Image (cartoon, grey):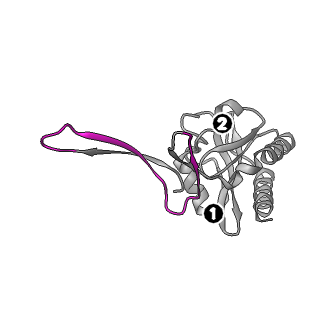
Protein backbone atom coordinates (compact mmCIF):
# COMPACT_ATOMS: atom_id res chain seq x y z
CA UNK A 1 0.00 0.00 0.00
CA UNK A 2 2.95 2.32 0.41
CA UNK A 3 2.56 3.13 4.08
CA UNK A 4 3.98 2.10 7.42
CA UNK A 5 1.63 -0.24 9.28
CA UNK A 6 1.98 -0.77 13.04
CA UNK A 7 2.25 -4.41 14.12
CA UNK A 8 2.35 -5.99 17.58
CA UNK A 9 4.32 -9.21 18.04
CA UNK A 10 4.03 -11.27 21.24
CA UNK A 11 6.78 -13.75 22.12
CA UNK A 12 5.47 -16.36 24.54
CA UNK A 13 7.66 -18.55 26.76
CA UNK A 14 6.66 -21.09 29.40
CA UNK A 15 9.16 -20.11 32.06
CA UNK A 16 9.48 -16.39 31.30
CA UNK A 17 7.03 -13.52 31.04
CA UNK A 18 5.70 -12.77 27.57
CA UNK A 19 7.60 -10.15 25.58
CA UNK A 20 5.61 -7.68 23.52
CA UNK A 21 7.27 -5.95 20.59
CA UNK A 22 5.74 -3.05 18.67
CA UNK A 23 7.06 -2.65 15.14
CA UNK A 24 6.30 -0.64 12.03
CA UNK A 25 6.15 -2.54 8.77
CA UNK A 26 7.45 -0.75 5.70
CA UNK A 27 6.16 -1.83 2.31
CA UNK A 28 8.60 -3.33 -0.17
CA UNK A 29 10.10 -0.65 -2.39
CA UNK A 30 9.34 2.31 -0.10
CA UNK A 31 12.20 4.84 -0.23
CA UNK A 32 13.73 5.58 3.17
CA UNK A 33 16.01 8.24 4.61
CA UNK A 34 18.47 6.89 7.17
CA UNK A 35 19.78 9.06 10.01
CA UNK A 36 21.85 8.44 13.12
CA UNK A 37 21.33 10.20 16.44
CA UNK A 38 24.05 11.41 18.78
CA UNK A 39 23.40 8.38 20.97
CA UNK A 40 24.13 6.05 18.05
CA UNK A 41 20.51 5.15 17.27
CA UNK A 42 19.61 4.45 13.66
CA UNK A 43 16.50 6.34 12.54
CA UNK A 44 14.53 5.40 9.45
CA UNK A 45 12.22 8.02 7.97
CA UNK A 46 9.99 7.41 5.00
CA UNK A 47 11.09 9.60 2.10
CA UNK A 48 8.43 11.63 0.28
CA UNK A 49 9.31 12.60 -3.28
CA UNK A 50 6.78 15.44 -3.09
CA UNK A 51 8.22 16.69 0.20
CA UNK A 52 10.52 19.14 -1.59
CA UNK A 53 7.69 20.88 -3.42
CA UNK A 54 5.33 21.58 -0.52
CA UNK A 55 5.47 25.37 -0.96
CA UNK A 56 4.93 25.06 -4.72
CA UNK A 57 2.02 22.64 -4.15
CA UNK A 58 0.52 25.08 -1.63
CA UNK A 59 0.63 27.87 -4.25
CA UNK A 60 -1.06 25.61 -6.80
CA UNK A 61 -3.75 24.73 -4.24
CA UNK A 62 -4.30 28.41 -3.51
CA UNK A 63 -4.72 29.17 -7.22
CA UNK A 64 -7.15 26.26 -7.73
CA UNK A 65 -9.13 27.25 -4.66
CA UNK A 66 -9.46 30.87 -5.80
CA UNK A 67 -10.54 29.75 -9.28
CA UNK A 68 -13.20 27.30 -8.10
CA UNK A 69 -14.14 28.35 -4.57
CA UNK A 70 -13.43 24.79 -3.40
CA UNK A 71 -11.08 23.34 -0.81
CA UNK A 72 -8.05 21.94 -2.66
CA UNK A 73 -5.24 19.74 -1.41
CA UNK A 74 -2.16 17.84 -2.55
CA UNK A 75 -1.02 14.64 -0.87
CA UNK A 76 2.07 12.50 -1.05
CA UNK A 77 1.55 8.74 -0.80
CA UNK A 78 0.69 8.96 2.91
CA UNK A 79 -0.31 12.42 4.12
CA UNK A 80 -1.78 15.75 3.07
CA UNK A 81 1.13 18.11 2.28
CA UNK A 82 -0.70 21.24 1.02
CA UNK A 83 -4.20 22.71 1.55
CA UNK A 84 -5.99 25.89 0.48
CA UNK A 85 -9.54 27.18 0.72
CA UNK A 86 -10.21 26.21 4.33
CA UNK A 87 -9.93 23.19 6.64
CA UNK A 88 -6.14 23.45 6.78
CA UNK A 89 -6.00 22.56 10.47
CA UNK A 90 -8.14 19.44 9.94
CA UNK A 91 -6.16 18.19 6.93
CA UNK A 92 -2.54 19.38 6.92
CA UNK A 93 -0.12 16.60 7.82
CA UNK A 94 -2.91 14.09 8.43
CA UNK A 95 -2.79 10.54 7.10
CA UNK A 96 -5.04 9.78 4.11
CA UNK A 97 -7.67 7.03 4.33
CA UNK A 98 -7.16 3.52 2.94
CA UNK A 99 -9.95 4.24 0.42
CA UNK A 100 -8.01 7.22 -0.88
CA UNK A 101 -4.88 5.05 -1.10
CA UNK A 102 -6.87 2.58 -3.23
CA UNK A 103 -7.93 5.40 -5.55
CA UNK A 104 -4.28 6.39 -5.87
CA UNK A 105 -3.19 2.81 -6.57
CA UNK A 106 -5.81 2.52 -9.33
CA UNK A 107 -3.98 5.33 -11.18
CA UNK A 108 -7.31 6.66 -12.41
CA UNK A 109 -9.06 9.93 -11.72
CA UNK A 110 -11.92 9.58 -9.25
CA UNK A 111 -14.96 11.84 -9.26
CA UNK A 112 -17.83 11.38 -6.83
CA UNK A 113 -21.01 10.86 -8.85
CA UNK A 114 -23.56 11.39 -6.09
CA UNK A 115 -24.29 7.67 -5.72
CA UNK A 116 -23.29 5.80 -2.57
CA UNK A 117 -21.53 7.46 0.29
CA UNK A 118 -18.74 9.94 -0.47
CA UNK A 119 -15.24 9.02 0.70
CA UNK A 120 -13.39 10.79 3.51
CA UNK A 121 -10.01 12.44 2.97
CA UNK A 122 -8.64 11.55 6.41
CA UNK A 123 -9.89 9.33 9.24
CA UNK A 124 -12.48 11.11 11.34
CA UNK A 125 -13.08 13.92 8.84
CA UNK A 126 -16.79 13.20 8.36
CA UNK A 127 -17.48 16.59 6.77
CA UNK A 128 -14.42 16.71 4.49
CA UNK A 129 -15.27 14.50 1.52
CA UNK A 130 -13.49 13.72 -1.74
CA UNK A 131 -15.11 15.32 -4.78
CA UNK A 132 -12.24 14.71 -7.24
CA UNK A 133 -8.92 12.87 -6.81
CA UNK A 134 -6.29 12.81 -9.57
CA UNK A 135 -3.10 10.74 -9.16
CA UNK A 136 0.28 12.43 -9.59
CA UNK A 137 2.55 10.22 -11.72
CA UNK A 138 6.21 10.81 -12.56
CA UNK A 139 7.99 8.31 -14.81
CA UNK A 140 5.31 5.75 -13.95
CA UNK A 141 5.74 6.16 -10.18
CA UNK A 142 2.85 7.25 -7.95
CA UNK A 143 3.77 10.35 -5.98
CA UNK A 144 0.45 11.47 -4.54
CA UNK A 145 -2.90 13.03 -5.39
CA UNK A 146 -4.47 16.35 -6.29
CA UNK A 147 -7.80 16.68 -4.48
CA UNK A 148 -10.91 18.79 -4.62
CA UNK A 149 -12.66 18.47 -1.28
CA UNK A 150 -16.24 19.20 -0.32
CA UNK A 151 -16.67 20.70 3.12
CA UNK A 152 -20.45 21.12 2.98
CA UNK A 153 -21.43 17.47 2.56
CA UNK A 154 -22.31 17.81 -1.14
CA UNK A 155 -19.27 16.26 -2.82
CA UNK A 156 -20.62 16.45 -6.39
CA UNK A 157 -18.53 18.63 -8.71
CA UNK A 158 -18.49 19.47 -12.39
CA UNK A 159 -16.19 19.01 -15.34
CA UNK A 160 -14.13 22.10 -14.41
CA UNK A 161 -12.79 20.58 -11.18
CA UNK A 162 -12.18 17.24 -12.91
CA UNK A 163 -10.12 18.81 -15.71
CA UNK A 164 -8.29 21.16 -13.35
CA UNK A 165 -7.27 18.31 -11.01
CA UNK A 166 -6.17 16.25 -14.02
CA UNK A 167 -4.09 19.15 -15.39
CA UNK A 168 -2.42 20.04 -12.07
CA UNK A 169 -1.61 16.37 -11.36
CA UNK A 170 0.01 16.05 -14.80
CA UNK A 171 1.89 19.33 -14.26
CA UNK A 172 3.24 18.25 -10.86
CA UNK A 173 4.27 14.89 -12.32
CA UNK A 174 6.19 16.57 -15.13
CA UNK A 175 7.74 19.02 -12.68
CA UNK A 176 9.03 16.13 -10.56
CA UNK A 177 10.51 14.42 -13.62
CA UNK A 178 12.71 17.43 -14.41
Kindly report which numbered mark, 1 or 2, lies closer to the viewer in this rendering.
2
Viewer-proximal residue among 152 and 85: 85
Residue at image point 70% right, 63% down: 137
Question: Dots 1 and 2: beta carbons under 8 Å?
Answer: no
Instruction: Indicate whether residue 36 is drawn in magenta.
Output: yes
Judged from the image, the secondary structure of the residue bearing numbered disc 2 is helix
Local packing at callout 1 (Cα closer than 10 Å; few below 14, some 14-19, many 20+) is: some
Report the residue marked by disc 2. Answer: 91
- Horizontal side of residue 56 vs 97, given as left or right: right
- The CA span between labels 1 and 2 is 22 Å
Does 87 sit above or below residue 19?
above
Residue at image point 76% right, 60% down: 176
Judged from this view, the residue extending furthest toward the bottom is: 139
- Horizontal side of residue 161 vs 141, given as left or right: right
Question: Which residues, given as a range, are shown in magenta?
Answer: 12-38
Residue at image point 78% right, 47% down: 57
Judged from this view, the residue extending furthest toward the left is: 15
Q: Position of residue 104 (x, y in %)?
A: 61, 57
Viewer-proximal residue among 29 and 42: 42
Q: Position of residue 53 (x, y in %)?
A: 77, 50
- Horizontal side of residue 152 vs 46, given as left or right: right
Q: Position of residue 25 (x, y in %)?
A: 44, 52
Does 61 sit above or below residue 107?
above
Image quadrant assignment for residue 2: bottom right
Image quadrant assignment for residue 79: top right
Q: Name the disc covering residue 107, or none.
A: 1
Viewer-proximal residue among 151 and 83: 83
Does 100 sit above or below residue 140?
above
- Nearer-N-terminus badge (1/2): 2
Q: Quadrant of the C terminus?
A: bottom right
Amino acid sequence: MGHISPVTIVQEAKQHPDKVFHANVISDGDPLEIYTSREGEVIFKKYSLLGGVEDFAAELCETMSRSTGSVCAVTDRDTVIAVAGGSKRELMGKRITPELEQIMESRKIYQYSGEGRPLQVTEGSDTLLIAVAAPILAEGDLLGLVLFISSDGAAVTGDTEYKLAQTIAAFLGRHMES
